[in-house]
Amino acid sequence: MAKTRPGVVVTGLTLGALAAVSLLAFQADGAVTRTPAAAPAASAAAASPSPTAEPGPAVAALPAVSGSGRRVVYSTGLHQVWLVDPKKTPPVQGAFKVTPGTVEPLPGSYSVYSRAAAGTGTDGLSIEHVIRFVQQGSTVFGFSAAVDPSPATPPADTTPKKTGGIRSNRADGQALWDFAPTGTRVTVIP
């Protein structure tokens, strides 16, 4: 029987324990969002959940039941979007409030199937960074940002339209555009 030196055994056990702790920390990190208040002052800008410079409405932490892998998460109840990439630190690359259209998409997992740099919304506003991810009935659901958020003249037709445009501000729209090319998963949760 070969003799083992005690230092080799201790080193092996220590490395094994560090690997296990690192794996558990990585798995836990995917379900929890770091808040800017916990970040050191020097890196506060990097820890900001939204690319906008001005303070906006409070942003909730990523819900634990929001899928897995790289994805855009949209909560119909919170009217909030999270850009999630578990391979990065922190995994939540951005989080911001949005304004929904007149109807909401059903909860589920979808994929970005179409993008347009600019267009006109059903409300007559000029929009940019249009990212479409599902059509349910005659309503197309997607993200966009209004170029000029001031109200447009309402269409002459007074019939209420079902609109599925989910609007963000321009900076958040740019972040979403950069994060979600065609094929990116979009998870809609209540």
Image (cartoon, rainbow, N blue to C red):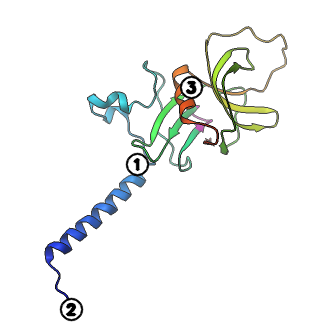
Locate the N terminus and report the quarter of the image it occupies.
Answer: bottom left
Judged left or right of residue 184, residue 164 is: right
Report which residue position mark 1 lands on: 29
Q: Amino acid at mark 2?
A: Met
Q: Are marks 3 and 2 in contact (CB under 8 Å)?
A: no
Residue 166: which quarter of the image? top right
Judged left or right of residue 138, residue 165 is: left
Q: Nearer the viewer, mark 3 or mark 2?
A: 2
CA neighbours of label 3 inside 10 A, class few (<14), some (14 to 19), many (20+): many
Judged left or right of residue 183, residue 17 is: left
Report which residue position mark 3 lands on: 173
Main SS, magenta region, reads loop
Label tally: 3
Residue located at (72% from left, 26% from top): 102
Residue located at (14% from left, 78% from top): 5
Report which residue position mark 2 lands on: 1
Judged left or right of residue 12, residue 45 is: right
Locate the C terminus and report the quarter of the image it occupies.
Answer: top right
Residue at disc 2, secondary structure: loop
